[in-house]
Amino acid sequence: MRQIKNKRLNIVDENQTRIHATLVIFLIGIYLFIGDISIIYILIYDFFVRIYVAPFLSPLYIISLQVVRLIGLKQKPADELAKEFASHIGLTILFIILFAEYFRETHISFLLIVVFGIWKAVEIIDSECVACKFYELPKHKGIEVVSL
């Protein structure tokens, strides 16, 4: 996420994150219809690399960036720290889904992937990052999340 921010304003492009969410929803749909665990590995790789290594190694990041450029959307600023926190929550959910699948708890993985998909759908449709709201909760109490 660090590559898409504007260094002066500490923002990310909301349009790009919405397109990224659309691609995640697409992969979730494939996972729900096919049930192939490799889709979860792809999503974990994408989130992990985008957060901890370099966004330009993330396939969904590259695709979303190219779509934004192709369509010619203007940059729509969003808070980078909240989006990064949300990405950490997403990655944690994906790891829990992977472990649930590993232990053959498919009902748990199905429930979590549906919840994750709904969160991403809300981000696409309403421009509301559900996981970002969790970032804002401590801020209302005067607590600032410094790092994860």
Image (cartoon, rainbow, N blue to C red):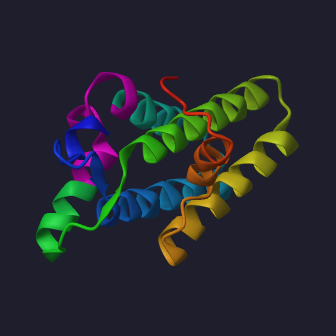
Residue 109 as seen in the image, left or right of residue 46: right
Identify the image quadrant of the N terminus: top left
Residue 132 x, y percent position in the rendering: 56, 51
Instruction: Decide: is 91 above or below 10.
Output: above
Q: Is residue 2 left or right of residue 44?
A: left
Q: Residue at x 58, y 54 (%)?
A: 28
Q: Is residue 89 magenta?
A: no
- Residue 52, image x, y percentages: 37, 23
Q: Which residues are magenta?
A: 50-63
The quadrant holding residue 30 is bottom right
Residue shown at 31%/66% (left/top)?
A: 15
34 or 27, nearer to the observer:
27
Q: Is the magenta region chiefly helix, strand or loop?
A: helix
Quarter of the rendering containing residue 45 = top left
Q: Residue at x 22, y 46 (%)?
A: 4
Left-right relation of 43 to 6 = right
Q: Residue at x 86, y 33 (%)?
A: 105
Image location (x, y in percent) of residue 100: 78, 30
Q: Nearer the viewer, residue 143 or 40?
A: 143
In the image: residue 23, left or right of residue 132: left
Above or below — where is 17 with respect to 123? above
88 up-or-down from 31: above or below: above
**Residue reaching furthest to the front:** 142
